[in-house]
Amino acid sequence: MWFRRVSGALAMAFTLLAAGGVQAQGNNDIFTVRNVAVDETAQTAADARQAALAVGQRRAFRRLMGRLVPEDQQARIPDVDANLLQYYVLDFSVNNERTSTVRYLADLTFRFNPHEIRKLLRGAEVAFAETRGKPVVVLPVFSDPVTEPTLWTDENPWREIWAQRPGDDGLVPLTVPLGDLGDLAAIDAPQALAGDAAALRAIAERYGAEDVVVAEATLSGDPESGSGVLQVVSRRYNDGTAGATQRDKLVQVSGEPYDGFLQRAAARIDSSIQETWKQQYLLQFGNQRSLLAFIPLGSLDDWLILRRRLEGVAAIQQTGLVTLSREEAQMEITFVGDEQRLTRALAQRDLFLALRPDSNWELTLADRRPRSPAGASELPPPATAPLPQ
C-alpha cells in the first residue's frame, strides 16, 4: 500500500514542519518591492548612484508600509533613520540602469527582512496585515454625454488608466483584462453593469480569479477645461454574486490634467479595496490560540501541497504533529486571531478548514474536497459592508 511505502517520508515531512512552522517562508514575497524608479544627479556618476540607492530604499520602505499598514495606523510607523534603514533590507537588484557622468537612472527592487519589519511594527504597536489575497479582476466601464457605456472600445480612457496602474503593489492583486477576443466573448459593458453572473464568472476564470470589481465611471462637465465631474460606482462580485458597493463623486481640481483626474479616481477605488482587505486580515498578536486539526491522508503529494500552502499563512505562528495513522494525521495549529479569520486566511491559500459532525476541525485541500461535504460546517463569511470612502 502507498502508506507503508512512504510512511517514513511522510513522518519526516511532518517532523520538518513541526520544527520549522513559524512565520512561513512562502509569505516573504510580500516583503519585496519592485519597480522603484530613481533618477538622481550629483557631481559624479558614483555619487549619483549612491544617492539614488538611498532615495530608492526610502521609497521602497514607504511603499511596503503602505502595503501592510492600514491608513489609520500610518502615523504610528516609526521614523527609521537613513543609516539604520539598510539593516531592514536583505538585498536589492537593478534593472534598466542608465548613467551619464553626473546622472543615474534605474528601476530598483528591494527585498526587506520579514523578521525585522515585523519586529519594528510590533515594537511600535502598529497593526498590520500580510495575507495575500487572490487576484481580483477590474472591469472599467466608462460613459460620458456623447459615449454610451463602453468597456473594450478605444473610447474608454478609464480602462487605459487602469491598465497603466501597477496591479500587484497591494495585498490584493488587481488585474485588468487585456481586451483580446476571449475577453470580448466573455463579457461586454451591458453585462458587466447588469451583474450578469455567468459573464462575470467567465471573465474571472480567464484570469484565475474569483472576484470581479465593475468600476463604472460616468463623466460630466469638460475635463479639458478643468471642470470635469466623475460619478464612480464600484461593485464587487464573488463567483458572480453581488457584494459590496462603493459610490463616489470626484470634482476636478484647478490645474489637474484629465489623465491625473482619472488616475485619482482609480487610486481611490484601489485604496478602498486594499484598506478593506487589511482591516479584515490584521494580525491580532494579542489574541493567540490553537486548535487541533484532522488531516485526511490521500497521497504524499497531497500532503506536500498542503504543507507548502500552510507556509504562506501569516496568521499561523507554529504547527506541530500530534498523531499519525494510516488514514489521517492530527496537527496542532497555533495562530493569532480567531477561527473565522484563520479560516478566511487559509481559503486564500486554497485550504479548507471546517468543523466535522463530531465537532472536530478538519483541514483539507480546497480543490480536493467534495463541493458539499456531508456534515461539514464552514464558518460564515464576514458581513458585507460598503467599501470605505
Image: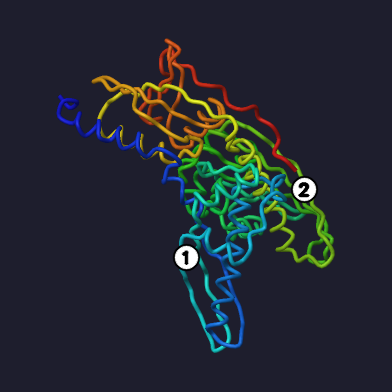
Where residue 41 is drawn, which disc sits there?
A: none
Residue 168 vs 319, above or below: the answer is: below
Mark 2 vs mark 1: give the one in front.
Answer: 1
Q: Position of residue 233 (x, y in %)?
A: 71, 43
- Between 209 and 95, the residue placed more toward the observer is 95
Circles 2 and 1 in contact, beta carbons < 8 Å: no
| Lower position in the chain sequence, tag 2 or tag 1 | 1
Please identify the quadrant where the C terminus is shown.
Answer: top right
Q: Position of residue 79 (x, y in %)?
A: 67, 58
Point 77% across, 52% down: residue: 230
Q: How many marks?
A: 2
Residue 92 vs 148, above or below: the answer is: below
**Quadrant assignment, res 17:** top left
Where residue 92 is drawn, which disc sits there?
A: 1
Q: Position of residue 374 (x, y in %)?
A: 41, 14
Q: Amino acid at mark 1?
A: Phe
Q: Amino acid at mark 2?
A: Gln
- Between 349 and 84, the residue placed more toward the observer is 84
**Quadrant assignment, res 158:** bottom right
Point 34% across, 27% down: residue: 321
Point 56% across, 87% down: residue: 44
- Kindly state the secondary structure of the residue where label 1 is placed: strand
- Kindly state the secondary structure of the residue where label 2 is placed: strand
Please identify the quadrant where the N terminus is shown.
Answer: top left
Point 41% across, 36% down: residue: 310
Q: Position of residue 289 (x, y in %)?
A: 52, 26
Q: Report crowding for label 2: few under 14, some 14 to 19, many 20 or more residues within 10 A (C-alpha).
A: some
Q: Which residue is mark 2?
A: 231
Real-space Cα separation, disc 2 to disc 1, in angstroms:
41 Å
Classify residue 203 as left or right of residue 55: left
